[in-house]
């Protein structure tokens, strides 16, 4: 259980030290470079959902090369987006980015909006991504909370072993309280620094507390770094799942030049025909693929 404070979150650590640490430890990620546009940052945030940086970087670079503006992606097809998505996983994100680009062109004259409210109104953009783009692309003072930030705050401030289940109200309040310990103009950078701290130092399984800039004020360390104060999250398996079956079917269609017969999909997942049928149906429902009049299958927009 997280401890609650009637007077609002109590800040135990000096988070200015996290900024100093970040000045030295910040990773050289391409979407953090000078000259990267809000659209390119938005693309990176969508790609980074549930996907490691090492897998995202080459795909992001290719998308930036091919579609540097929303108008460029909007002019492409959904099939182009799904094919270029490659093996990043959760390919519906590619379709959502394509729809997002079209909405930006249609409703915002091709310019990514800078307010959280307008960003939330775009297809496929949820609360986290809207806040991340407003903060990192436009330098706005809005809290941004991902799993890494929640873990850092759970340990440093609440003394828990790991982050509990997400709670928008609690998480944003905790992050806001921490951000308010530094000047307004430094808050977007502190949001990025907290994420980096959770990703590199305050990790879920093997935290490197000796390298942590706020170890002296960490409530979890002060309590003796107790284990199991939060129920462990279940790790999703991939082998043999519907997700894997969907991926195999999409692989066939990505590699094909146009529509393919049903038999080409059948041989891609022979272990469980019922699961293959279920995966195929879900791809159709999600709009990732289409069936042609003669019964063949293709990526959406290619039939």
Image: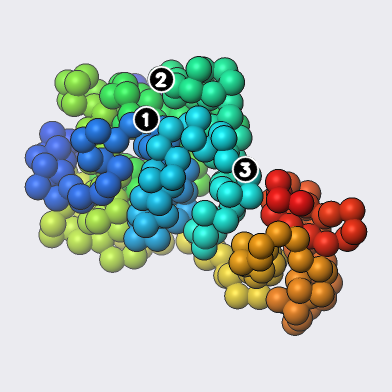
Whether the residues at callouts 2 and 1 have beta carbons within 8 Å, the answer is yes
Circle 3 or circle 1, nearest the eye: 3
For the residue pair 49 and 237, the one nearer the viewer reads as: 49
Q: Could you tell me which secondary element the residue under label 2 belongs to?
A: loop
Tell me the mark number nearer the camera, choosing from 2 and 3: 3
Q: Whole-Å distance between the Cαs marked 2 and 3?
A: 26 Å
Q: Quick one: which residue is furthest to the right in this view? A: 294
Q: Residue furthest bottom?
A: 271
The answer to whether any part of residue 145 appears in the image is no
From the viewer's perspective, tell me whether residue 39 is left or right of residue 127. left
Image coordinates for residue 141, horizontal then vertical, percent: 30, 21
Q: CA distance from mark 3 to mark 1?
A: 22 Å
Q: Residue at x 84, y 54 (%)?
A: 292
Q: Residue at x 33, y 31 (%)?
A: 37
- Residue identified by numbered label 3: 77
Label 3 packing within 10 angstroms: few (<14), some (14-19), many (20+): some
Binning the other alpha carbons within 10 Å of mark 2 as few (below 14), some (14 to 19) or many (20 upward) gives some
Q: Which mark is residue 61?
A: none
Q: Is residue 20 left or right of residue 226?
A: left
| Image x and y of residue 226, in percent | 31, 60
Question: Residue 278 at what x, y percent from top left?
Answer: 80, 63
Asked if one can make out residue 206 in the rendered structure from this viewpoint, the answer is: yes
Tell me the distance, in whole angstroms, between the alpha carbons under discs 2 and 1.
9 Å
From the viewer's side, name the closer residue of 221 and 89.
89
For the point 63% across and 44% down, which residue is it? 78
Residue underneath mark 1? 38
Vertical side of 210 occupied by 123: above or below: above
Q: Is residue 140 above or below residue 156?
A: above
Pointer 2 residue: 114
Expressed as whole percent of the image width and height from the top left, the position of residue 244 reads 63, 69
Question: Between residues 255 and 53, which one lies in front from this camera angle?
Answer: 255
């Amino acid at each position: 259980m997280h401890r609650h404070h009637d007077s609002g979150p109590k800040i135990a650590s000096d988070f200015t030290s996290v900024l100093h640490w970040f000045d030295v430890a910040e990773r050289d990620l391409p979407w953090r470079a000078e000259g990267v546009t809000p659209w390119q940052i938005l693309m990176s945030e969508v790609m980074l959902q549930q996907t490691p940086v090492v897998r995202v970087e080459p795909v992001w670079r290719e998308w930036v090369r091919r579609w540097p503006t929303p108008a460029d992606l909007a002019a492409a097809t959904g099939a182009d987006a799904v094919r270029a998505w490659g093996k990043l996983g959760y390919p519906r994100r590619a379709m959502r980015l394509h729809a997002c680009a079209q909405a930006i062109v249609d409703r915002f004259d091709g310019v990514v909006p800078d307010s959280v409210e307008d960003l939330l109104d775009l297809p496929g953009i949820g609360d986290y991504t809207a806040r991340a783009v407003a903060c990192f692309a436009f330098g706005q003072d809005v809290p941004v909370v991902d799993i890494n930030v929640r873990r850092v705050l759970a340990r440093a401030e609440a003394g828990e072993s790991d982050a509990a289940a997400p709670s928008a109200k609690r998480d944003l309040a905790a992050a806001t309280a921490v951000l308010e310990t530094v000047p307004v103009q430094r808050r977007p950078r502190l949001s990025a620094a907290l994420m980096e701290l959770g990703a590199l130092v305050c990790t879920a399984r093997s935290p490197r507390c000796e390298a942590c800039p706020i170890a002296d004020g960490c409530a979890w360390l002060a309590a003796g770094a107790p284990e199991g104060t939060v129920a462990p999250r279940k790790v999703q398996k991939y082998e043999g799942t519907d997700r894997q079956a969907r991926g195999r079917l999409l692989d066939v269609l990505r590699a094909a030049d146009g529509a393919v017969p049903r038999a080409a999909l059948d041989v891609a997942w022979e272990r469980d025909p019922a699961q293959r049928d279920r995966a195929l149906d879900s791809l159709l429902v999600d709009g990732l693929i289409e069936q042609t009049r003669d019964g063949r299958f293709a990526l959406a927009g290619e039939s």
